Amino acid sequence: MMDASYPPPLDRLLTLGAPDIDEWLEYRELGFGEEHIPELIRMATDEELIRGETEDPAIWAPVHASRALGQLRAEAAIEPLIARFHESDEDDWVAEELPEVFAMIGPAAIPALSRYLQDRSQPRWPRMTAATSLKNIA
């Protein structure tokens, strides 16, 4: 297992493994609340976890953390999650699930997503992820 240090209840996300594509866990029922948002953001963007060994269940913790952030409507997560768009070329999860997360966060994400979409210096596929996110919010 990776050397990731997270307090409870976040440490549980390190052991859940691959999430179900269609059935999202109810993260509030697992004990997550607004007080966990900063650590969930840290986990959702943790490069060690994201780039970890495929057989380690901890590599799925950023997915669970992002889903929890969506369910918590965590506006503080908007910019950090947008920063993951550059991974959409190599990580299907980013392109497929982050738009769902942004839909849960809601209209507060529209300005940042719009700026990203309009930034022609960003690659095409990450901008498509921003467009899909905006569509899902609408």
Image: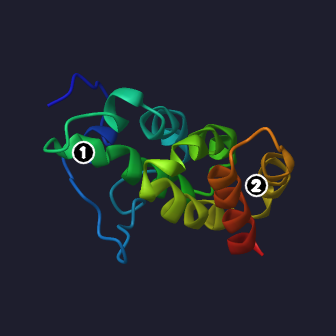
Distance of mark 1 from mark 2, alpha carbons? 28 Å
Kindly indicate whether the residue at mark 2 contacts the one at mark 1 (C-beta within 8 angstroms). Answer: no
Q: Is residue 44 left or right of residue 119?
A: left
Q: Nearer the viewer, mark 1 or mark 2?
A: 2
| In this picture, residue 4 sits left or right of residue 117 | left
Compared with 22, 88 (above or below) is above
What secondary structure is found at the residue carrying circle 2?
A: helix
The label shown at residue 123 is none
Location of mark 2 (residue): 109
Residue 93 position within the rendered picture, expressed as x and y whole percent measured from the top left: 43, 57
Under mark 2, the amino acid is Ala
Q: Is residue 14 visible?
A: no
Residue 23's quadrant in the figure? bottom left
Q: Which residue is mark 1?
A: 12
In this rendering, is residue 134 above or below 60?
below
The residue at 86%/50% (across/down) is 118
Which of these two is toward me, 50 or 44?
50
Q: Quadrant of residue 130?
A: bottom right
50 displayed left or right of 133? left
Which quadrant of the figure contains the C terminus? bottom right
Q: Is residue 78 above or below residue 24?
A: above
First of labels 1, 2 by sequence position: 1
Residue drawn where x is 60% and y is 46% of the image: 85
